[in-house]
Amino acid sequence: MTKHQITQPVGENQEAPDQQPGWLEALRRQFDAEVHLPSDISQEFLSAALLFVIENKVDFGLFHEAGRIIIAHFGGDEIYLPSQWSDKRWHIGLEDKEFFDPGD
């Protein structure tokens, strides 16, 4: 297997290796809300969450940045997306605050 390395300096029309291309950022800005999952979230949970989003016909974009996986979506679809509940674990959907006592 041959390794290739790009040694050309970053110019005005190029993106730095740790930045998303401009067209990708423009696409991401089309959505008005995001869920930021840790990149070490289990594959099973991520798969289940994405299948649930698809089954419920949620328009979304999936992005990856250092240390996190981002599901961009439109506001109002939060009930179909992962969220971190008061038990500090990730679940699909919103926590029922009626049963949550902040004094606990």
Image (tube, rainbow, N blue to C red):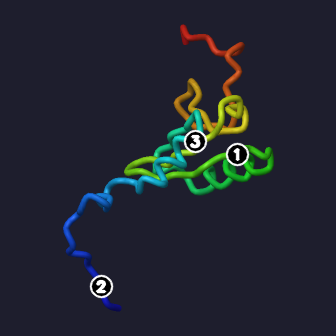
Query: What label sits on residue 2 in the rendered view?
Result: none
Query: What label sits on residue 59 in the rendered view?
Result: 1
**49 over 83 or under it: above or below:** below
Left or right of residue 56, residue 38 in this image: left
Q: What residue is rendered at 67% in x and 47% in y?
A: 49
- Say what amino acid the circle numbered 3 marks: Gln
Q: Dot 1: within a 10 Å radius of its alpha carbon, few (fewer than 14), some, or many (20 or more) residues? A: few
In x, y percent, where is residue 57? 78, 46
Q: Dot 2: within a 10 Å radius of its alpha carbon, few (fewer than 14), some, or many (20 or more) residues? A: few
Foreground disc of the pair 1, 2: 1
In x, y percent, where is residue 26? 50, 47
In x, y percent, where is residue 16? 29, 58
**Residue wearing tag 3:** 30
**Residue wearing tag 2:** 3
- Say what amino acid the circle numbered 1 marks: Asp
Q: Secondary structure at mark 3?
A: loop
Q: What residue is rendered at 54% in x and 49% in y?
A: 27
Q: Secondary structure at mark 1?
A: loop
Q: Dot 3: within a 10 Å radius of its alpha carbon, few (fewer than 14), some, or many (20 or more) residues? A: few
Q: CA distance from mark 3 to mark 1?
A: 11 Å
Foreground disc of the pair 3, 2: 3
| Front position in the image: 103 or 32 | 32
Task: Place residue 99 in its image quadrant.
Answer: top right
Left or right of residue 47, residue 1 in this image: left
Q: What residue is rendered at 56% in x and 32% in y?
A: 84
Q: Secondary structure at mark 2?
A: loop
> Disc 3 or 1, which lies upstream in sequence?
3
